[in-house]
Image: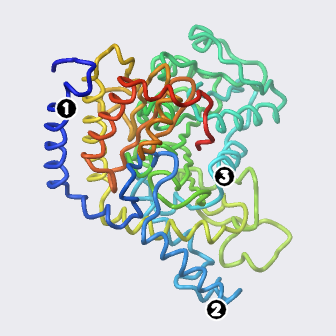
């Protein structure tokens, strides 16, 4: 590929790429799903890994619940279609298929960080010879804050102080509740460092299945096998993976997992989250008990003592937010039709095209890719690095292309298989070239907007 900086000289190349992309779109088995989302015709939406677009099915589910509330009032708990009372349990089969779990191992409940607090309260019980809570520095910040707080609650030093790689790998046992942090390497998690840090003094470890910044996909089964060899409990945050990447939580032996439903699953801002607990742990008492975790048949007995549900439902805390749970019902219908396997195949094809085109830009423009190239180590989005990333992201938005910025130098681009076209990917990378070639980004300030 000839590398030239002049966008006009490259016009022939881009027209060829656009024609190829349109052929791919014509052959796309998932192309009809785009019409089931509210996709603004004048925009290219590449921020579905922060907040997915609204589907007609999700909207209809919310409107149905609103109507039931209007017409039935409190009787909607038993008279809704389906009844509100056990909607979270009814959604479990659709969720289980996406994460590779058994139906009784997953529940839609709470929010991402609240669910993590529940799981840490349940599983992180430091013992004399096993005091460490292990995380990696690339985890989403809210996860790190939760980890700090639980170490502090047990009397340890809760502040997050990432050390050097050698410090993270140190095998010596902690003598008090300790947060051990595996540092990153060039924006990625060093898997070998992580494995070394999983010593026999680790009580609980948790990581992201897909890293929120880089899009790195972690080798879950390998991590679980290592953790279990040293006697540690291990969990994963699936927030940037569910709906884009298939998981096999049960078969991989994951102890617990948690996630949101508002990214690739398109269930709306602040949607009810989800959690998984492997069935071998279902006799554990929840660290944080609440009435919605009660045995369903006796929940309204209002007994003064907690009588937990028999499965993962015991880890629920409070009444589900029905208006934030309903959209998930609609979203899951779409995913059941599309199939997570086909979604993953198209997602990989979209990100492969995106990375190939960015690689073809003139190096003097300053673009590089942080995301792993190996499909087996790549989630659903691509982290494009540029020293002027904040201003480049703003220039893209001014053109109607919606990206995401992560400081200090990453533009995240998330082509979502259900509504992103190959044509959109070509248009976006061509825009990146034009923006920097013409210095269009210099019209914008460096301060970031509020982007989730």
Left or right placement of residue 375 versus residue 158 in this view: left
Q: Which residue is mark 3?
A: 284
- Front residue of 360 and 352: 360
Circle 3 or circle 1, nearest the eye: 1
The tag on residue 71 is: 2
Q: CA distance from mark 3 to mark 1?
A: 62 Å
Q: Residue at x 28, y 22 (%)?
A: 361
Residue extending farthest top? 166
Q: Check disc 3: other Cα within 10 Å, few if <14, some if 14-19, many if 20+.
A: some
Of the pair 54 and 431, the residue shown nearer to us: 431
> Looking at the image, which residue is at 31% across and 47% down?
344
**SS assignment at label 3:** loop
The nearer-to-camera label among 1 and 2 is 1
Q: Is residue 205 left or right of residue 149?
A: left
Frontmost of labels 3 and 2 is 2
Q: The residue tagged with tag 1: helix, strand or loop?
A: helix
Which quarter of the figure has residue 434? top left
| Residue 346 picture location, percent across and down | 26, 47
**Between disc 3 and disc 1, whose residue precedes?**
1
Q: Is residue 372 above or below residue 82?
A: above
Q: Position of residue 308 (x, y in %)?
A: 70, 65
């Amino acid at each position: 590929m000839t590398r030239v900086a002049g966008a006009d000289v490259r016009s022939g190349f881009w027209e060829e790429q656009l024609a190829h992309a349109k052929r791919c779109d014509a052959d796309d088995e998932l192309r009809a799903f785009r019409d089931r989302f509210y996709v603004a015709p004048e925009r290219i939406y590449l921020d579905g890994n922060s907040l997915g677009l609204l589907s007609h099915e999700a909207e209809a589910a919310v409107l149905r619940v609103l109507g039931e509330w209007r017409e039935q009032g409190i009787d909607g708990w038993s008279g809704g279609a389906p009844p509100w009372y056990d909607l979270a349990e009814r959604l479990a089969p659709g969720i289980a298929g996406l994460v590779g779990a058994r139906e009784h191992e997953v529940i839609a409940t709470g929010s991402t960080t609240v669910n993590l607090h529940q799981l840490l309260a349940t599983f992180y019980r430091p013992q004399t010879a096993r005091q460490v809570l292990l995380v990696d520095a690339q985890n989403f910040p809210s996860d790190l804050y939760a980890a700090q707080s639980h170490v502090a609650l047990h009397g340890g030093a809760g502040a997050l102080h990432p050390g050097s790689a050698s410090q993270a790998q140190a095998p010596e046992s902690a003598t008090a509740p300790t947060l051990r942090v595996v540092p990153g390497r060039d924006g990625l998690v060093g898997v070998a460092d992580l494995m070394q840090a999983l010593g026999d003094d680790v009580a609980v470890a948790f990581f992201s299945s897909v890293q929120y910044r880089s899009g790195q996909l972690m080798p879950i089964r390998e991590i679980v096998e290592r953790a279990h060899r040293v006697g540690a409990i291990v969990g994963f945050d699936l927030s940037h993976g569910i709906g884009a990447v298939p998981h096999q939580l049960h078969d991989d032996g994951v102890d617990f997992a948690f996630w949101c439903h508002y990214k690739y699953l398109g269930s709306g801002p602040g949607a009810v989250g989800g959690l998984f607990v492997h069935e071998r742990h279902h006799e554990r008492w929840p660290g944080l008990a609440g009435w919605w975790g009660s045995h369903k048949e006796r929940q309204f007995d209002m007994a003064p003592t907690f009588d937990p549900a028999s499965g993962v439902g015991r880890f629920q805390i409070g009444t589900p937010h029905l208006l934030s749970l309903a959209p998930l019902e609609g979203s899951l219908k779409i995913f059941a039709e599309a199939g997570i396997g086909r979604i993953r195949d198209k997602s990989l094809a979209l990100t492969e095209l995106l990375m190939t085109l960015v690689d073809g830009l003139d190096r003097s423009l300053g673009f590089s890719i942080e995301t792993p190239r190996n499909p087996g180590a790549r989630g659903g989005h691509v982290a494009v690095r540029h020293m002027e990333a904040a201003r480049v992201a703003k220039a893209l938005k001014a053109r109607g292309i919606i990206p995401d910025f992560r400081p200090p130098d990453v533009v995240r681009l998330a082509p979502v298989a259900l509504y992103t076209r190959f044509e959109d990917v070509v248009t976006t990378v061509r825009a990146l070239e034009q923006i920097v070639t013409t210095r269009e980004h210099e019209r914008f300030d460096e301060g970031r907007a509020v982007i989730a």
